[in-house]
Image (spheres, rainbow, N blue to C red):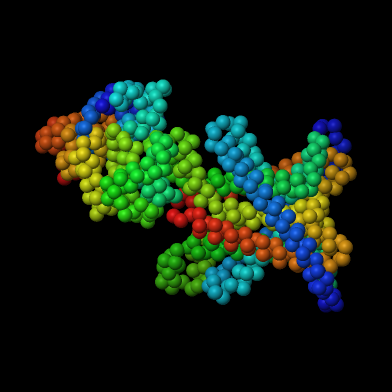
């Protein structure tokens, strides 16, 4: 369970998160929608501990992410994150990209790590690309590799930060299919996205962020079918 | 360290050496840049195939130690009975040395101008010369200037080697004083400080220009 | 104009001796590069440490190395340290001077290479649970070395050319030193130094070629 309690976060004088309260249960798929600058991506990087927070608490299975005593590196192996830019490691092959962290962070043997990496890559449809360098692949393939890389750490939660935003339109589908597959397998997921159709389909709940505030959260039918927040109504009208 | 036999006259001697360093540098960089621009434009015009002999010869100046070049040139002028003074020989060698590097810089600068821009200029009815003068030169200068500043400072530092031909530039002047006064550290520190004071501000300017111009 | 007769045979007889000198030249250059690379990595670490004293020290080193002549740096090692009672042999002074110079230039190359690697790479590594050191070691460092490879190769060629400066502090075992000794005995300056120039040229080209082949093998992406 991920518990977010009254989290505040500023960059300089700009407050991007103005007291967020949110709980995500095991097995749940939550998507977060909202305009740019709404703070939705920042929240993900805070959950992962990549960004410090100014107030409030984030608990992952009861462990406080930003507590000094927390071993962040250990915690992060529980929390997979995939970013908008694919962040492939260009000097490593696809297989090596996926094997690196399990070997160095989890201390798996080379054989174990390779076996696991092959499994994850096959799972996302890249079983044929093991020896290829990421720069030779399409954006969609690189992004699926990044997903496999995160999955190889056997995370209990997956955070997706606008993973299709940097892709050409014709490549969006293959990545969304991968996310759908993960959702159907019962992975706990928080997805920040601009893909409304996708959000509607896979989510258990959808949250709408506006200017650092979670303005509305509801099941997809309710949120898309009968939006209450005036800003959400405007947002949905503009994106359709 | 403040108990020194170093006199004001000695400091004047060092400064004279520094002036010699600057003189050799100024002559060589000026001549080398003119040659470098000519060679660079020629290389660009005739293409890599026909420019191969020129490229090969210039590459020699970058692959043989400058000290060896100086000694060879000095021996050559003696053999050919040219009667060159060490100053002349030094300047000739350093000019060619500068030209070898400058050619690469100029070539890089010219090829950084997009062909489409040049075609646009020519399509407006500009002659080759006008295109070079009003389009290529300003754009290429922007790209090349930081490297050229680096080259100038490089030549200034490398000019220390002309001491081998007996020219009393800054480092040689320091060495003379070291031998006479037996205070190597103090004198060399002053010598180093002079080099640094000449080089550092200009290097910073080059870095600043590079940063400013690469941002847009 | 040319009443001078060239004596190439006499000079060519000394070729084996000169080639021995070339080996010393190569040895000094290689050693100075190994030491220089290690020092440059340390200087880069100092600059990244965020510690003001370490950072200032590294910056001072880099700026002195880049803003004074290499020959001056060798003189400092040879004559300057005499004030502290340290008397380095020509070989050691030459090696120390070039290594100092290499370290400064290489550290600056590393800095440029690091700038070219986006922060998101480190971030991606950290998000997978790596420590900052692991992220640097496995993700940033290999990419940095690749970007810096060409400048490092150039520095190696520079190091070879710089070894010739040893002759000015009395080095007599490397190519320039041996050539100078032969010259002092025979006064066949042009012949001996022309042969030396050819050898230097060939070494420089061989090193460049070897580096290119090595790069093709090492960097497949």
Badge count: 0
Residue displayed at 85% across by 35% down = B4
Rendered residue at 29%/25% (across/down) = A61
In the image, A186 versus A10, the foreground residue is A186
- Check the picture and name the quadrant holding the C terminus of chain C: bottom left
Q: Quadrant of residue C17?
A: bottom right
- Along the horizontal axis of the image, is C62 left or right of C112? right
Query: In the image, A29: left or right of A82?
Result: left
Please say whether residue C67 is visible from this viewpoint.
Answer: no
Residue C1 in percent (x, y) is at 83, 77
Q: Which of A87 and A165 is in front in this view?
A: A87
Vertical placement of residue A1 versus B73, above or below: above
Is C1 positioned to the left or the right of A153 in the image? Answer: right
Residue A224 in picture, x, y percent from top left: 13, 37
Write down the quadrant of residue B116 in the picture.
bottom left
Q: Where is residue A124 in the image (x, y as percent from the top left)?
A: 27, 47
Residue occupying image coordinates x 63% and y 42%: C39
Image position, residue B21 (x, y; %): 75, 53
Instruction: Locate residue B145: give its quadrant.
Output: bottom right
Q: Which of C208 and B4 is in front in this view?
A: C208
Residue A90 shows in this picture = yes
Q: Is residue C122 left or right of residue B205?
A: left
Residue A4 sits above or below residue B34 on the image: above
At x 42% / y 49%, what residue is drawn? A92
């Amino acid at each position: 369970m991920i518990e977010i309690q009254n989290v505040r976060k500023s960059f300089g004088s700009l407050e991007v998160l103005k007291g967020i309260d949110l709980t995500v249960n095991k097995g749940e798929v939550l998507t977060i929608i909202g305009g740019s600058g709404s703070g939705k991506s920042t929240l993900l990087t805070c959950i992962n501990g990549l960004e410090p927070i100014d107030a409030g608490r984030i608990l992952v299975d009861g462990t406080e992410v930003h507590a000094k005593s927390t071993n962040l590196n250990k915690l992060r192996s529980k929390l997979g994150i995939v970013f908008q830019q694919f962040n492939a490691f260009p000097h490593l092959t696809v297989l090596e990209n996926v094997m690196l962290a399990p070997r160095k962070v989890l201390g798996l043997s080379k054989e174990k790590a390779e076996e696991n990496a092959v499994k994850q890559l096959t799972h996302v449809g890249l079983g044929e690309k093991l020896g290829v360098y990421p720069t030779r692949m399409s954006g969609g393939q690189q992004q699926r590799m990044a997903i496999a890389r995160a999955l190889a750490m056997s995370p209990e939660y997956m955070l997706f930060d606008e993973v299709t935003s940097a892709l050409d339109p014709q490549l969006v589908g293959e990545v969304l299919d991968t996310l759908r597959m993960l959702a159907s397998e019962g992975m706990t997921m928080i997805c920040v996205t601009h893909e409304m159709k996708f959000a509607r389909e896979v989510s258990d709940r959808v949250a709408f962020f506006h200017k650092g505030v979670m303005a509305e959260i509801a099941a997809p039918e309710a949120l898309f079918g009968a939006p209450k927040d005036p800003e959400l109504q405007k947002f949905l009208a503009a994106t359709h | 360290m403040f108990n020194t036999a170093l006199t004001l006259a000695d400091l004047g001697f060092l400064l004279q050496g520094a002036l010699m360093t600057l003189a050799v540098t100024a002559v060589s960089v000026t001549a080398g840049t003119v040659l470098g621009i000519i060679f660079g434009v020629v290389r660009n015009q005739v293409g890599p195939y026909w420019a191969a002999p020129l490229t090969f010869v210039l590459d020699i100046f970058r692959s043989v130690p400058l000290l060896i070049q100086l000694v060879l040139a000095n021996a050559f002028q003696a053999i050919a009975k040219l009667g060159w003074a060490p100053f002349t020989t030094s300047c000739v060698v350093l000019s060619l040395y500068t030209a070898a590097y400058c050619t690469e810089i100029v070539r890089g600068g010219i090829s950084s101008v997009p062909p489409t821009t040049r075609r646009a200029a020519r399509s407006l009815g500009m002659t080759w010369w006008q295109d070079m003068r009003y389009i290529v030169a300003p754009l290429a200068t922007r790209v090349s200037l930081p490297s050229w500043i680096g080259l100038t400072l490089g030549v200034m530092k490398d000019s220390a080697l002309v001491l081998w031909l007996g020219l009393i530039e800054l480092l040689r002047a320091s060495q003379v004083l070291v031998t006479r006064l037996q205070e190597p550290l103090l004198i060399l520190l002053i010598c180093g400080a002079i080099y640094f004071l000449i080089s550092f501000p200009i290097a910073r300017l080059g870095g600043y220009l590079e940063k400013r111009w690469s941002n847009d | 104009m040319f009443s001078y007769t060239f004596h190439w045979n006499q000079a060519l007889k000394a070729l084996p001796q000169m080639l021995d000198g070339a080996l010393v030249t190569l040895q000094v250059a290689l050693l100075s590069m190994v030491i220089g690379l290690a020092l440059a990595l340390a200087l880069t670490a100092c600059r990244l440490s965020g510690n003001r004293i370490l950072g200032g020290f590294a910056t001072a080193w880099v700026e002195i190395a880049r803003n004074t002549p290499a020959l001056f740096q060798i003189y400092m090692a040879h004559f300057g340290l005499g004030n502290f009672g340290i008397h380095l042999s020509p070989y050691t002074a030459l090696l120390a001077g070039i290594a100092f110079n290499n370290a400064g230039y290489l550290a600056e190359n590393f800095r440029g290479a690091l700038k070219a690697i986006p922060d998101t790479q480190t971030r991606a590594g950290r998000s997978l649970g790596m420590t900052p050191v692991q992220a640097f070691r496995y993700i940033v460092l290999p990419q940095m070395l690749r970007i810096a490879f060409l400048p490092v190769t150039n520095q190696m060629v520079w190091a070879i050319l710089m070894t010739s400066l040893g002759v000015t502090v009395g080095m007599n075992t490397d190519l320039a030193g041996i050539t100078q000794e032969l010259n002092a005995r025979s006064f066949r300056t042009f012949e001996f130094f022309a042969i030396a120039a050819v050898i230097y040229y060939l070494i420089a080209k061989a090193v460049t070629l070897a580096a290119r082949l090595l790069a093709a093998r090492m960097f497949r992406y």
